[in-house]
């Protein structure tokens, strides 16, 4: 009798865990669909190339803040930024020229896979996101990535303001700590498998 009870309890816990994980995975999918990432790849790993990468990042985040004014969804943000790509490339190259670098900059809006990433006030779950990808020069150096819309990576944006862009269920995801949330790892493994199978 005790064994049957233990088995039933185990099955209940297992079922509850599966439902909880499925709900978490769905919330993660909603986060990915409501976010536009920024991915800046440096020319190389030299100290100068990495410094220039961050300067370009700062300039483009500020550009995004202006371009996205009035955007309420990630789709709106993409629609607003796509016509500005050439201007953004010129902005990035102007930053390089001001710092004695003549590398070319190529910017595209594309789908990219990102691993789980924890920032100071929020966490982005793993999976495929729409991203503004910025290749500097040969784009063989270490990269930098964050969130372009909503403007979570602008220093002037408060945590409360940033969270205001998300639904209640999405907030539970982005404010969870991956260190204490094993579901982030499970979602990352599943998304990696899905991404590899889609290629």
Image: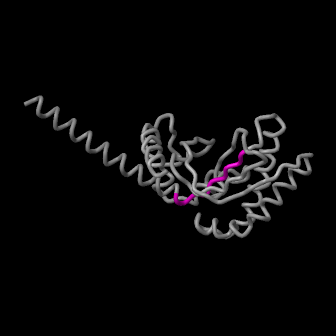
The tally of labels here is: 0
Q: Is residue 107 above or below residue 12?
A: below
Residue lying farthest to the top in this orientation: 2
Residue lying farthest to the left in this orientation: 1
Q: Position of residue 30 (x, y in %)?
A: 48, 58
Say how the picture is coloured: one colour
Residue at left offset 90%, top offset 51%: 97
Residue at left offset 75%, top offset 43%: 42
Residue 74 falls inside the magenta stretch: no
Q: Is residue 179 above or below residue 162?
A: above
Q: Position of residue 109 (x, y in %)?
A: 65, 60
Q: Position of residue 58 (x, y in %)?
A: 78, 51
Judged left or right of residue 71, residue 126 is: left
Q: Magenta residues?
A: 33-41
Residue at left offset 71%, top offset 70%: 83
The answer to which of 102 and 27 lies nearer the viewer is 102
Residue 36 falls inside the magenta stretch: yes
The answer to which of 159 and 60 lies nearer the viewer is 60
Judged left or right of residue 3, residue 80 is: right
Q: Is residue 14 above or below residue 25?
A: above
Q: Main secondary structure of the magenta part?
A: strand
The answer to which of 86 and 25 lies nearer the viewer is 86
Residue at left offset 37%, top offset 46%: 21
């Amino acid at each position: 009798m005790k064994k049957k009870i233990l088995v039933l309890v185990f099955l209940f816990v297992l079922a509850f865990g599966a439902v909880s994980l499925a709900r978490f995975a769905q919330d993660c999918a909603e986060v990915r669909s409501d976010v536009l990432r920024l991915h800046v790849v440096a020319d190389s790993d030299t100290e100068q190339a990495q410094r220039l990468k961050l300067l370009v990042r700062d300039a483009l985040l500020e550009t995004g803040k202006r371009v996205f004014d009035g955007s309420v969804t990630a789709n709106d943000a993409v629609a607003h930024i796509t016509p500005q790509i050439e201007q953004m490339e010129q902005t990035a190259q102007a930053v390089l020229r001001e710092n004695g670098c003549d590398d070319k900059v190529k910017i595209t809006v594309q789908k990219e896979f990102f691993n789980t990433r924890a920032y100071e006030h929020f966490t982005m779950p793993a999976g495929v996101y729409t991203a503004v990808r910025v290749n500097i020069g040969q784009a063989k150096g270490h990269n930098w990535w964050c969130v372009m819309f909503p403007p979570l990576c602008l220093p002037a944006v408060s945590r409360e303001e940033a969270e205001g862009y998300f639904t209640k269920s999405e907030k539970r995801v982005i404010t969870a700590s991956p260190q204490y949330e094993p579901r982030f790892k499970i979602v990352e493994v599943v998304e990696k498998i899905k991404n590899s199978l889609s290629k």
